[in-house]
Amino acid sequence: MSNAAAEPIETSLPRARIDWIPLILVPVLAIATLPLVGNVSAWVTLTVAGLAMGMMIFLMASGLTLVFGLMDIINFGHGVFISLGAYATLLVLGPLAGWASADSIGLNLALLVLCIAAAMGLTAVVGVVFERVIVRPVYGNHLKQILVTMGGLIVAEQAIHAIWGASPIPVPVPETLRGAFVIGDIVMERYRVVAIGIGLLVFFAMQVLLNRTRIGLLIRAGVENPEMVEALGYRIRRLFVSVFVAGSALAGLGGVMWAFYRQTLTAGMGMEVMVLVFIVIIIGGLGSVGGCFVGSVLVALMANYVGFLAPKLALVSNILVMALVLIWRPQGLFPVARR
Amino acid sequence: MTRSSAPARSFTETRIRRGPSSWLLSSDTPRSWALSLILIVIVTCLAAAPFLFSGSQPLSTAAKICVFVLLVASYDLLLGYTGIVSFAHTMFFGIGGYGIAIALERLGPSWESVAVGLVAALALSAVLAAVIGLLSLRVRAIFFSMITLAVASAVAVLASQLSAITGGEDGLSFQLPAELRPAFRPFAEPILGLAINGRILAYYMIFITAAVLFLVLLRVVNSPFGRVLQAIRENEFRAEALGYRVVAYRTAASVISAMAATVAGALLALWLRYNGPDTTLSFSIMIDILLMVVIGGMGTLYGAIIGAALFVLAQSYLQVLMGAGSQTLSGIPILPDLVHPDRWLLWLGLLFIVSVYAFPGGIVGHLRKRGRSHELG
Amino acid sequence: MAKGIDEPLLRLEGVHTHIGPYHILHGVYCEVPNGELTMLLGRNGAGKTTMLRTIMGLWRASSGSIHFDGRDITALPSPDIARSGIAYVPEAMAIFSDLTVRENIVLAARNGPVHSSRLDWMFGLFPALKRFWNLPAGHLSGGQKQMLAIARAIAEPRRLLLVDEPTKGLAPVMIHSMIEAFRALKAAGETILLVEQNFHAASQLGDNVIVMDDGLIVHSGAMSDLVADKALQQRLLGLSLDSHQ
Ligand SMILES: Nc1ncnc2c1ncn2[C@@H]1O[C@H](COP(=O)(O)OP(=O)(O)OP(=O)(O)O)[C@@H](O)[C@H]1O
Ligand SMILES: [Mg+2]
């Protein structure tokens, strides 16, 4: 990128301080629940499930939080992309049903990759249209943004009903991804492990993009001060459209993962999970990708542990976590500096 | 949060035409002949519904319109006048419904149970609304929307899971106090050819409560308090600079709105003799409310009457119409699918988007603008 | 581009700017000559920042025209104005505090890596940047942030620098080194339009001076003439003798 960094230069100030406290929350939560759960193998299962769910929520939420940070736009219709991504699997599963039932890791993974490609492609295209038709005309007006993106959500859900029908559709998990890895008395469902892998992969790819490329620097700079990015000679609009589209595609990816996790498709599935997505981006700090990641894991682990210990309170516990975080840090765990 | 619709009107202009009706409407008259006419027709139809239509279906539709007028008007106080978007309105609606249902089911069908249920529901709503408001509005108004969405869905899930108290997915059916049952006959003779029974009394109870609370809301938005809300909506920072405590005002509006929604929920439960997640708590009702308030006209309150009437009628009768259309168009590709009765929400959704873009004042704003341009031209 | 000798690099003609309902600039006429340092003076709220932002296209001129390097840039989007060769250092500095010093400079250099000789020149002007090269810019002191903001503007050669109150809130010793830096920039032949409240500092630096009041240019000419004319200073800037130290 630049030769400027070539020469090592000493700093007399302490190195960049990382804000550890929010990061520590996750292991603290995990370890604190171990005695409550009481049994290590159940705890591992719960933790793996929580991590898998956290990765999926992160996929869905990361685009939304960046779009917000960059352009101050809040898209209540983001759930559309999750649902659409999930339904896009049908485009692949229809003609290639044989690949799903085949007992071959190669074919199964190829199928998963194709599903992801179809979902991300479809949601990226719809994202372009959504940005152009729904979001752009209401730039700068939160009230209208919420209303119009909500309208977009209604129309898109209805369109899904019109195309694929209103009744739930079962989705089979590819053969070799079913079942679990068993190590001693510890059981980890395979698909969840795959989901964690994909989530981590995307997270690290995003970190590299955001920290090691010019586009990434521009996005981070734009979250902090879009006007100055323009004054430096970059078109923030283009940047924004790309982030919006990428965010839509990531939500589509999240939708695929979510579809195989739930093994059923409904048009409203996107909106259902949006509740967690909103909690996550509030907890993480609007605009912060790192916060979004920590928030996702925190919320998903919490939901799984509480779901085990006191099933009826799972969602309520997340509201509680959100309230506590907001009382502690009103701008979220990792507040993003803004003008 | 700036809004381009409905320029702040001059209050002195409307104050000039005083009179009893003007007093009743808090000097905030419809200000358009067409609008007045439509409103008079709707209100007359609602007031005389038991006498005009026979059968239980139209009366149920009329009762539902009354309930939704109140619900949507209370939402408009938040959305149109305060400029914040809440997704928890159905939660308060549901609290009202469950308050009545649980009290009547547990304590027996008496007026005391109704009172206990209503008061408890109102108290719970007020506290919840205040807590949510203080927690989220303190930070950013945009948090309010997300947090209300999260809290409302958590409550919806909770309500369906605590089946010992709420009846779960099945909801609760209960008996009404004797005076509201169909068998109750207050008068020996029919009035205007209609035998009055408890059901009709229940209808009028709903109609009158909704009407009175609507007028109260009209009073609220035209009070100094209401004007501060609108000032905050127009320019949050200026209002803050003028010394108004924005968070306090917004939270207060949210509490008032929540309590009115709670009453609406109680009324609906009383009418249906039932309350469950699908009648009051579900997210699709939240969407319906949004559609009604935006299509009727945000920030006008009268829009609530038009929006609710239009929507409930559409819900009850448009699907029949579209079914017929779908039949006639069968044979042509795609078209029958688009006018399929299940697709009516698709069209309302599109209408909703167009309304937000092109008619931010909704039907009411449009009628008023037309009226004004006629006067000028 | 062949131009007449007297052709100014930047010319504003009858520029009006509205911010929302407020009318801020009321027809600004002024010129910035090529290769010289022009000071923009005026009391608080005179419209200096608004003028710079209007030049950058961050506020839109509602009428009038802005010509830069013989081109009408009035209606260009901000990024295009920047790419036509204008660098802007806003009043609030607007460094990206989440990015390191290095990353801030990398973004400012649109055409790839900064030439190492240029980097050395920048480090010579602002040594602190070299020391804190890989530190998040948010950790810098106010003066260091200001240096970074200026370094960002000169990371690549530009035709014109717009700098808004670089000495605001700085300690006297910092102000001194800032003035030295601008002197060096001037010596390097940069064209600069510099907003400055401190007349003492301004008078040492400026070749030309423009004075604004209430959204209008009330005086423009050579700095030396204004320095010589105490009565004019008194009238334009409300300066009393004690503020000269
Ligand atoms: N965003 C804004 N909205 C409304 N008015 C503004 C805005 N920004 C500036 N103004 C007004 O425009 C006028 C000129 O402001 P400007 O910031 O250009 O002055 P200035 O000369 O830079 O002042 P200073 O020396 O204090 O920086 C002031 O009266 C100010 O109140
Ligand atoms: Mg200024």
Image (tube, coloured by chain):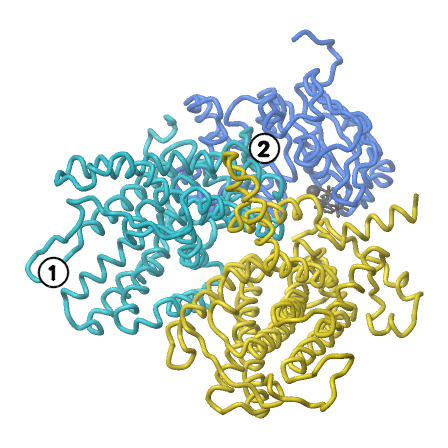
Chain colours: A cyan, B yellow, C blue
Count the marks. 2
The residue labelled by disc 1 is A186
* Mark 1 residue element: strand
Task: Check disc 2: other Cα within 10 Å, few if <14, some if 14-19, many if 20+.
Answer: many
Tell whether C111 sits left or right of B222: left
Residue A276, position as x, y percentages in the image: 40, 58
Q: Position of residue A204 (x, y in %)?
A: 30, 42
| Quarter holding ligand 1 | top right
Judge whether B138 appears above or below C237 on screen.
below
The reply to whether residue A74 is visible in this rendering is no
Left or right: A99 as drawn, with respect to B297? left
Crowd class of label 1 (few under 14; some 14 to 19; many from 20; radius 10 Å)? some
Vertical placement of residue B311 versus C20, above or below: below
Quadrant where the N terminus of chain A sits is top left
The one of C194 and A191 positioned closer to us in this rendering: A191
The residue drawn where x is 37% and y is 26% is A3
Quarter of the image holding residue A202? top left
| Residue C211 relative to residue A296: left or right | right
Q: Is residue A52 visible?
A: yes
| Residue B31 pos. (x, y %) | 85, 58
Badge 2 marks a residue whose secondary structure is: helix
| Residue A154 screen position, x and y as percent | 52, 50
In terms of image quadrants, where is residue A24? bottom left
- For the residue with label 1, is its CB less than 8 Å from the closest atom of ligand 1? no
Please determine whether, in this image, residue B312 is positioned above or below residue C57: below
Q: In the depicted view, which residue is nearer to us: A266 or C154?
A: A266
Specify the amino acid type for callout 1.
Answer: Ile
Q: Amino acid at mark 2?
A: Ala
Chain to which mark 1 belongs: A
Q: Which residue is mark 2?
A: A231
In terms of depth relative to the viewer, which is nearer, C39 or B328? B328
